[in-house]
Image: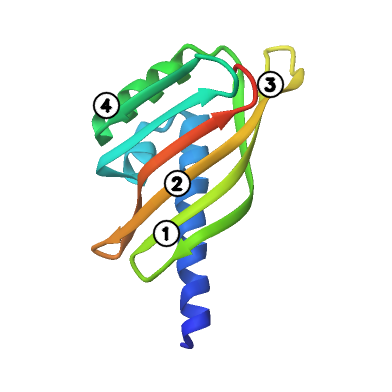
């Protein structure tokens, strides 16, 4: 396999982890959610131009517990759409990527609305053949 193809394969694996994060949160699958974060991961976020935010949380268990509590408090179905990945860096074992977020909600009347948009900045590493999120920071354009 050429180096370029190998790097592209790493990029696809990294994106799969980020997509798994979105699926895990939206479906409230805490086992899948735990699988995407490294043991010492950190996460948090803010709403642009405000003091609203969440975290910072450190450690896989704390992250899963707190994200689960947020999800449990939401009465609509959420759909995280992550797009336009920009790899800041990508090596055999480390990646830094920025992605856009469009967050939709579907209420019990099946009304769909755009909840918010924003950006994720993620740092991932590969350990024992598995990519995991080490840091995930969100900058949202509005309340969620």
Is residue 64 shown above or below 94? above
Mark nearest the camera among 3 and 2 is: 2
- Residue 86 occupies quadrant: bottom right
Identify the residue under disc 2: 122
Q: Give the CA distance from mark 4 to mark 1.
A: 23 Å
- Are there few (<14), some (14-19), or many (20+) residues within 10 Å of tag 2? many
Would you name the residue on which mark 1 appears? 95
Q: Quadrant of residue 43?
A: top left
Q: Indicate whether 120 appears above or below 84.
A: above
Which numbered tag is attached to residue 36?
A: none
Return the residue at label 3: 106
Q: Are marks 3 and 4 in contact (CB under 8 Å)?
A: no
Q: Nearer the viewer, mark 3 or mark 4?
A: 4
x and y percentages locating residue 36 in the rendered image: 37, 45
Dot 4, how many residues are within 10 Å of its Cα: few (below 14), some (14-19), or many (20+)? some
Task: Classify mark 1: residues with Cα within 10 Å, few (<14), some (14-19) or many (20+).
Answer: many
Whole-percent x and y of residue 97?
A: 50, 53
Image point 50% across, 14% down: which residue? 51
Q: CA distance from mark 2 to mark 4?
A: 18 Å
Q: Secondary structure at mark 3?
A: strand
Q: Which residue is mark 4?
A: 62
Label 3 vs label 4: CA separation? 27 Å
Cβ atoms at labels 2 and 1 below 8 Å apart: yes
Q: Please tell me which of labels 3 and 1 falls first in the chain.
A: 1
């Amino acid at each position: 396999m050429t180096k370029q193809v190998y790097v592209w394969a790493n990029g696809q694996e990294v994106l799969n982890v980020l997509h798994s994060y979105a699926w895990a949160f939206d479906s409230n699958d805490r086992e899948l959610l735990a699988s995407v974060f490294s043991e010492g991961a950190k996460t948090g976020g803010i709403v642009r131009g405000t003091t609203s935010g969440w975290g910072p949380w450190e450690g896989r268990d704390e992250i899963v517990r707190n994200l689960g509590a947020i999800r449990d408090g939401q009465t609509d179905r959420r759909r995280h759409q992550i797009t336009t990945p920009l790899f800041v860096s990508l090596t055999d074992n480390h990646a830094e990527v920025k992605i856009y977020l469009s967050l939709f909600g579907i209420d019990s009347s099946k009304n769909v609305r755009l909840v918010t948009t924003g950006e994720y900045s993620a740092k991932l590493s590969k350990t024992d053949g598995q990519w995991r999120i080490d840091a995930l920071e969100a900058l949202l354009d509005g309340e969620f």
